[in-house]
């Protein structure tokens, strides 16, 4: 039986409605894409056509990525003594590399052959495949299963988390990094400038989570939420007059400023940065969020 998705339509973009779905408990587009559409897009188009500058820019940002992910591994190490991690949707392998540097045993699974090859060429073990119930059984169990910028792409996040749960040992952790969409600062920018929701890109992002909706989904899936941190509230650049929407040059300049700030804080004031970013969650802001939960 086909699932219905009742709820308030809050936006329309590229011919698809964005619904605050009462059945799912989070915001998503409708109609949802088919599995075959998703498979073709991420295997053949995502990095090749949609993100042609990704690998160039990721090299430019490598020191920042490694510092950021080192910061996240320190958080994970508070909640587990285990050091075996699966990274779902591992992309170019930065999270794997940061873990390997800290002595973790890491494995990636990545649907894009281009990204998986890039990761493997770095000496990081990466399986080229979509993460499914079957692959979860094949890959085994881990102390931590991590997914960064993945859950917004999948048509059935609840089922995806259930598959992730199969790979987590009892008492182990799940860590999800996700955009924080329809947050108050985004709404303030829309009010000030009359912009359309620039973060709504139905071909890329099927779901639009908040820390609260992701926490609810994890709780329903048998996890206890332990910690949630926001990330730099990039919308503050927009509100201060730096219009990066539709201007990649301005966007890269804003990102460079963010990197300068965070690289200093990671090195000199990591505890303060942690407090700041945990505090963002109270106000529902921060461009993304990291949520860590324990399997019951």
Image (cartoon, rainbow, N blue to C red):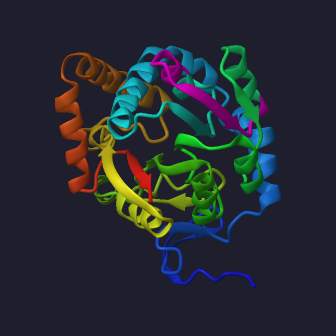
Q: Look at the image and give the residue range highlighted in magenta.
A: 97-113
Q: Which residue is drawn at 19% across and 30% down?
A: 271
Q: Quadrant of the N terminus?
A: bottom right
- Residue 257 to residue 47: above or below: above
Q: In this view, does 56 lie above or below 157?
A: above
**Quarter holding the C terminus?**
bottom left
Taking 104 as reference, is 118 left or right? Answer: right
Q: In which quarter of the image is residue 96?
A: top right
Q: Which quadrant would residue 239 be assigned to in this image?
A: top left
Is residue 30 something one can see in this rendering? yes
Q: Residue at x 62, y 54 (%)?
A: 166
The vertical placement of 13 against 204, above or below, is below
Residue 161: say if magenta.
no
Figure quadrant of residue 77: top left
- Viewer-side residue, 166 vs 95: 166
Q: How many marks?
A: 0
Residue 25 rendering spot, x and y as whole percentages: 47, 73
Left or right of residue 264, residue 9 in this image: right
**Percent position of residue 156, x then y:** 63, 64
Q: In this view, does 202 lie to the left or right of 220?
A: right
Q: Position of residue 3 (x, y in %)?
A: 67, 81
| Residue 37 placement (x, y as % from top left) | 79, 56
Q: Does the magenta-highlighted stretch encompass residue 112? A: yes
Query: What residue is drawn where x is 72% and y is 56%?
Result: 133
Confirm whether residue 210 shows in the render.
no
**291 left or right, relative to 154:** left
Q: Which residue is drawn at 58% across and 65% down?
A: 158
């Amino acid at each position: 039986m086909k699932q219905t998705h009742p709820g308030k339509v809050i936006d329309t973009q590229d011919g698809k409605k964005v619904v605050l779905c009462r059945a799912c408990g989070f915001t998503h587009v409708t109609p949802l894409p088919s599995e075959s559409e998703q498979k073709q897009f991420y295997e053949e188009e995502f990095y090749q056509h949609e993100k042609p500058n990704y690998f160039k820019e990721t090299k430019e940002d490598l020191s920042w990525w490694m510092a950021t992910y080192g910061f996240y591994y320190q958080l994970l190490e508070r909640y587990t003594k285990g050091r075996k991690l699966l990274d779902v949707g591992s992309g170019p392998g930065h999270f794997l590399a940061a873990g390997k540097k800290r002595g973790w045993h890491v494995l990636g699974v990545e649907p894009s052959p281009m990204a998986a090859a890039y990761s493997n060429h770095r000496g990081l073990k990466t399986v080229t495949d979509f993460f499914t119930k079957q692959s979860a059984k094949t890959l085994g169990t881990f102390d931590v299963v991590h997914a960064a910028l993945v859950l917004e792409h999948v048509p059935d996040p609840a089922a995806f988390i259930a598959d992730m749960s199969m790979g987590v040992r009892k008492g182990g952790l799940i860590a999800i990094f996700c955009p924080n969409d329809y947050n108050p600062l985004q709404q303030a920018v829309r009010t000030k400038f009359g912009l359309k929701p620039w973060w709504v890109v139905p071909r890329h992002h099927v779901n639009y989570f908040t820390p609260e909706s992701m926490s609810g989904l994890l709780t329903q899936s048998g996890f206890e939420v332990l910690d949630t941190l926001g990330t730099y509230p990039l919308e503050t650049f927009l509100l201060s007059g730096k219009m990066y929407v539709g201007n990649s040059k301005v966007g890269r300049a804003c990102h460079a400023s963010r990197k300068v700030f965070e690289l200093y804080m990671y090195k000199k004031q990591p505890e303060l940065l942690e407090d700041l970013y945990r505090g963002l969650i109270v106000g529902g802001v921060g461009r993304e969020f990291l949520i860590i939960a324990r399997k019951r």
